[in-house]
Amino acid sequence: MNLGAVILLTVLSHTGFVGSRMVVSLYALNQQASPFTVGALLSLYALLPMLLAVAAGRLIDRVGVVRPMAWAGSALVAGIALPGVWPSLDALFVAATAIGLAFMVYHVALNHTVGTMGTPADRAVNFSWFALGFSVGGFCGPLLTGFAIDALGHRAAFVLLATFPAAGLCALYLTRHRLPVRHAQHAETAERRVVDLLREPRLRAAFVASGLLATGWDLYTFVIPIYGSSVGLSASTIGIVMGSFAAATFTVRLVMPVLARRRVREWTVVALALAISGAAYSMFPLFTQVPMLMALSFLLGIGLGCAQPMIMSLLYAASPAGRQGEVVGVRTTMLNASHTFLPLAFGALGAALGMGPVFWSMSLLLVSGSAFVHSRQQRAS
């Protein structure tokens, strides 16, 4: 499978997914929803993925990626388009659930595909290029969504975003014969227990670091629309602020293939990423000016963006043979557990005390995670 084709599928699906999170938040706020309700909506993006990601990973190990991606792509299109056809808060709850489940399957399949490419020495480089696709989608989604809302309204924004995964379905059809089929014969017969994966020290440490980084990323998409609305920013301005985050992830990931080829230590990059991200979060409540919010978003994007390729390389290298899809599923389950409960917790905290404590709590988690990773690196050296 050509890596460029995988990146194209990533851009198209992720643009629709990230844009949907923004428009769901802003449309709910437009309908006078509270921060807690917005948090509940975003939690639904992660509820079914939390429960079903391991099963999805095992399915992909067994049957390959084409059929799961086809069904997931169709559900992603339907979920994003639904509130454009049925504009109501009820539709947002249904859409958030469907979009989250569909994108989870798509995401696990794409990661599995990249992991099968090339040699182990190429893996960090391939994941770095693959991560660029997420950065492009993360930039285009909020930016297009913000301008579409201001120019055309929320309903049109939902319909526009649905066209991206629809184009992805066409691209998937054209490249279906080059996608991986079943991964390994013995993966079906051996006893497979998730607890065995969690007992592996290398996997466990990577899961913890990955969860913290993904929580920081997920919280950003939750708090910035709320915080921006509370300080009087328009939808397009919020989109520009969030676009600077995505631009930073794209910029840093352009550099990551070079660093990966020079064999920079993965855990060093992860520890630095957590520290930078924690510092950025601590400063958000101190500013309301758009240039400073863009600068802090860019700094946060640098921190969170540089670590994901290294995390995926670490996970894939530590995965037992024939269980790579399952390992990605376990990681996805852990991430979505935090995505399910943290928006509810932070939404309640924001409703009670304001957004400042939300930013500072996340900062503390990330800085603590950096210390954990640093101590693990010292033990390993």
Image: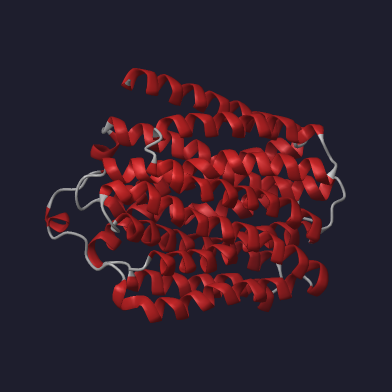
Residue drawn at x 75%, y 48% is 226
- Find the residue positioned furthest to the right: 232
* Residue 308, percent from left and from top: 47, 44
19 lies above or below 230: below
In which quadrant of the rendered image does the C terminus lie? top left
Residue 320 can be seen in this image:
yes
Residue drawn at x 45%, y 45% is 258
296 lies above or below 170: above
Q: Who is closer to the viewer here, 158 or 279? A: 279
Residue 342 can be seen in this image:
no
* Residue 206, percent from left and from top: 38, 36
Query: Picture quarter containing residue 164?
Result: bottom right
Q: In this figure, which colouring scheme has been used for the structure? A: secondary structure
* Residue 112, percent from left and from top: 33, 57
Residue drawn at x 45%, y 77% is 171
Is residue 282 toward the left or the right of residue 287 in the image? left
Residue drawn at x 45%, y 22% is 374
Count up the numbered dots: 0
In which quadrant of the rendered image does the N terminus lie? bottom left
Query: Picture quarter containing residue 347?
Result: top right
96 lies above or below 192: below
Is residue 96 toward the left or the right of residue 288 in the image? left
325 lies above or below 262: below
Q: Who is closer to the viewer here, 102 or 138? A: 138
Is residue 357 toward the left or the right of residue 230 in the image? left
